[in-house]
Image (tube, rainbow, N blue to C red):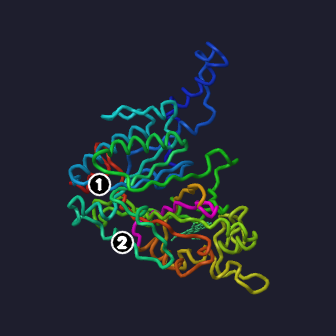
Amino acid sequence: RRLLGAAGAAGAAGLALGAAGGALGTAAATEPPTALSTVGSNRVPFRGDHQPGIIEPAQAHGHLLALDLAPGAGRKEAAALLRRWTRTAEALMAGETPASRLHDTGIALDAGPSSLTVTFGFGRTFFDRTGLAARRPSALAPLPPFSADELDAGRSDGDLWVQIGADDALVAFHALRALQREADGTARVRWQMNGFNRSPGATAAPRTARNLMGQVDGTNNPKETDEDFRQRVFVPAGGDPEWMAGGSYAVVRRIRMLLDDWERVPLDGQEKVIGRRKSDGAPLSGGSETTPVDLDKRGPDGNLAIAADAHVRVTAPASNGGAAMLRRSFSYHDGFRDDGAPDAGLLFVAWQADPMRGFVPVQRKLDRGDALSRFIRHEASALFAVPGGARKGEYVGQRLFE
Ligand code: HEM
C-alpha cells in the first residue's frame, strides 16, 4: 500500500483533542491526544510514476465525475485547468487546505487526508475540442457496442474524468467541490456518480470487499507481486503515445444489479452463478479464497465444479487469451425506482494498459451471456486515458500539452 501512515496525523489529532477537551478540561491540553483510529491520518502520495487511485485499495467513499469543456475553452484553458487541479489535488491529498484563488469551503477542516486520492483522465472527445486529435491514443477508440447494453448517453463518456476516493465522506465531498469550483468557466460537469465500499476497520482483518450482491469481489485481480502486473495495467515507457508512459486506461461502467431477482435465488444457485462460495469467496473447485480456480475439476456426479457459464470461468484470463484488468470498483445506491426496485449496483472501474487486451475481449464474451448477465444491466459507459503520475514540478497530463 502506498500509504504514508501518520503524516497527516495533525488533522486526526485535532479531532481527538476537540472530543477530549469537553470531558477533561485543561488536562487535555497537556496530554497528547490519541486518535480513535488511523483512518483519518493515512496519506497517499500524489506524485509518482503512476497517478494515485489505481493500485491503492478502493476507499470507503468515491465520486466519479465527467466534465465537458465549456464552449470557447480549448487547449490553453484545459492546460491551465489541469495546472490548477494538480495544485489543489496535491494539497488535498496531503490533508492541507488548498492555496487556491478560491476561498476554502472548510468542509474537511478537522479531518486528516483519510487516504484521499484524486485521479484525472481524458476522454476521446477531449482531443477534438483542444486541437490535439493527432496526439489521441489509438487505445481511446470507442468501445464496441455490446448487444445487452442499455446505455444512457448523458451518463456516458465526457471530455475529462475525475475519480475521487477517500475513507471519509466529508473529505471526499470537499475534494469534489474544490475541483468542480476550480473548473468553473472552463468545464462543466457532464455526469457524476457516487459510490461506496466497506469502511476500513469494519472487519477484524483487511479483507477483499463485497459488492451489493454479497459476493467477495476482487479476489482474482492481478496483484502487484505478479511478474506481469505493470505490463498489464500500465502503458510502458516508449509505448504509444509516449506521453501516456506510466498511464493506464480506465473503463467505467455503471452496472445496475437486479437485486430483487438476485435475492430470490437460493444460496447454492447464487454460488453457481459466480463459481465461488458466497461466505468466503473460495472457488467451488475447492480450497480457500486464494486457492487458484480449477476450471477442469469435476464433482462426484461428473459435472464441472465450476459451471460452463459461471462468471469466473467466462472472465478468467485463461478463457480470454490472457486478457486481464485490474477491477477497482465502488458500489452505488441512488434510491429506488418507480417499481420499488433499488437503483443500485456497481460503478465498475477496470484499469489496463490496453482496453483491447483487457475489458473488450472479456466483455464480448460476457455479452454472449454468462450466468450473471440476467441479473445486471450496463447503463452507462466511458473510457478514459489516464496519464502517468505528475513528476516533481509537473502538472498532471503536462506531457500531452508539450
Ligand atoms: C471476477 C462479480 C462484472 C470481469 C468476479 C468475481 C465476482 C465478480 C464476485 C469473483 C471474485 C474475483 O475474482 O473478483 C461481478 C459483478 C459484476 C461483474 C457483480 C457486475 C455487476 C464484470 C465485468 C467484467 C468482469 C463487466 C469485465 C468485462 C471479471 C474478471 C474476474 C471477475 C476478469 C476475475 C476472473 C478470474 O480470473 O478468476 N466478478 N463482476 N466482471 N470479473 Fe466480474
* Residue 246 x, y percent position in the rendering: 36, 58
**Disc 2 packing (10 Å; few <14; some 14–19; many ≥20):** few
The quadrant where ligand 1 appears is: bottom right
Q: Which mark is residue 69?
A: 1
Query: Where the C terminus falls, by quadrant?
Result: bottom left
Q: Nearer the viewer, residue 135 or 61?
A: 61
In the image, 242: left or right of 151? left
Residue 20 vertical position relative to residue 43 in the rendered view, above or below: above
* Residue 248 x, y percent position in the rendering: 39, 61
Residue 353 lies in the magenta stretch = yes
Magenta segment, prevailing SS (helix, strand or loop): strand
In the image, 129: left or right of 246? left
Residue 45 vertical position relative to residue 263 in the rendered view, above or below: above
Q: Nearer the viewer, residue 191 or 357?
A: 191
Direction front: furthest residue: 338
* Residue 344 x, y percent position in the rendering: 59, 60
Tell me if label 1 and label 2 are in contact, CB under 8 Å: no
Q: What is the CA distance from the residue labelled 1 to the residue labelled 2? A: 19 Å
Q: Which mark is residue 142?
A: 2
Q: Which residues are magenta?
A: 338-355
Q: How many marks?
A: 2
Q: Amino acid at mark 1?
A: Leu
In the image, 347: left or right of 207? left
Secondary structure found at label 1: strand
**Disc 1 packing (10 Å; few <14; some 14–19; many ≥20):** many
* Residue 378 x, y percent position in the rendering: 51, 69
Tell me what residue is drawn at x 64 percent, y 54 percent. 207
- Residue 314 lies in what quarter of the image? bottom right
Q: Amino acid at mark 2?
A: Pro
Instruction: Tell which tag, 1 or 2, sits nearer the viewer.
Output: 1
